[in-house]
Amino acid sequence: MLIPFREITRDALRRRYAVGAFNCLSVENVMGAVAAAEELHSPIILQLAEVQFPEAPMELMAPVFLRAARDAKVPVAVHLDHGRSIETCIRAVREGFTSVMFDGAELPFEENAEQTRLVVRLAHAAGVDVEAELGGEGTAAAAADVFTDVEESARFIARTGTDALAIAIGNLHGRYTATPRLNIARLREIHARNAVPLVLHGGSGTSEEDFKACIRNGICKINVATAIQIAAAEAVAEYLARGGSPGYIGIKRRIIEASQRAVAEHIRLFESDGKP
Ligand code: 13P
């Protein structure tokens, strides 16, 4: 069933688990993710990031995401991840996404707050929720000195009215060269100061210990992309390496199964199983 982002993340905040937000670039990823959620009786968020549009155009993917969500036996929200402009956020609203992320994290504070506030006004007018980002999550070089500031987070949330906030506590997108150590003390301070659900990006490769500490301290949504892509690529490579004559249908089946396994593993880690 298609459920608003706000309901899913607020329930996670109240019951202290994190909902997995899984980046899906294909029908196979979507089928695998929904199968995992149904198998484990878990809510999930299906999401697509703007950088992924060349391989997974939003207007083509939207009907797949929405139909899969409506048909699912568990709560599913459909979310735009890392919208780079107000225009992209509006396009997602038009397609029926239940929430959009406006990513102004690289902008100066004032500009990020101003643009996020406008996205919130426009999206809320259409009944769509908003996730914003404050702090320098993103690239390895940026990691250490750009953690989200506690006082700025409170000012930002008050100014923008965002429904959820992605924060930077040492998390990075993509493959880690070494397992990161997240700044849980900073997370705790941000959570103590703010009532909105907090979001952790760059979920792939985080240690179980850090995931659990995040969940105990206010992280309600965790984004996972790379782990699904690695699982799918490795499953296909293994299938092809077995020799014989590989078939396209066989490749698709391996991708569905690998996506399901990767999503199920994270659902268990995030403790959202059994919380429909
Ligand atoms: P990973 O690719 O590190 O899992 O990050 C996903 C993400 O944060 C998408 O916004």
Image (tube, helix red, strand yellow):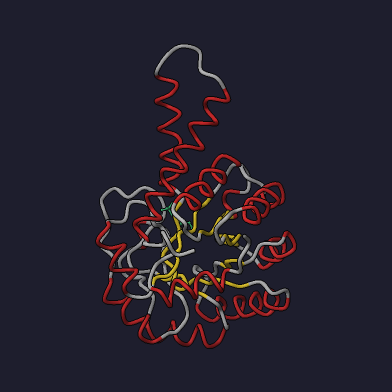
Where residue 75 sits, quadrant-wise, is bottom right
- What is the number of callouts on the image? 0
* Picture coordinates of residue 51, whole percent (x, y): 57, 51
- Nearest the eye: 198 or 55: 198
Judge from the rendering whether residue 244 lies leftward or rightward of residue 84; answer left or right: left
Judge from the rendering whether residue 181 lies leftward or rightward of residue 55; answer left or right: left
Q: Residue at x 31, y 56 (%)?
A: 206
* Picture coordinates of residue 126, whole percent (x, y): 73, 74
Q: Residue at x 40, y 19 (%)?
A: 241
Q: Residue at x 37, y 83 (%)?
A: 150
- Nearest the eye: 84 or 158: 158
Q: Is residue 121 above or below residue 5?
A: below
Where residue 143 sits, quadrant-wise, is bottom left
- Nearest the eye: 85 or 131: 131
Where residue 210 sits, quadrant-wise, is bottom left
* Picture coordinates of residue 95, whole percent (x, y): 73, 59
Q: Quadrant of ligand 1?
A: bottom left
* Picture coordinates of residue 120, whole percent (x, y): 63, 77
Which image quadrant: the N terminus? bottom right
Q: Residue furthest right?
A: 94
Q: Residue at x 37, y 81 (%)?
A: 191
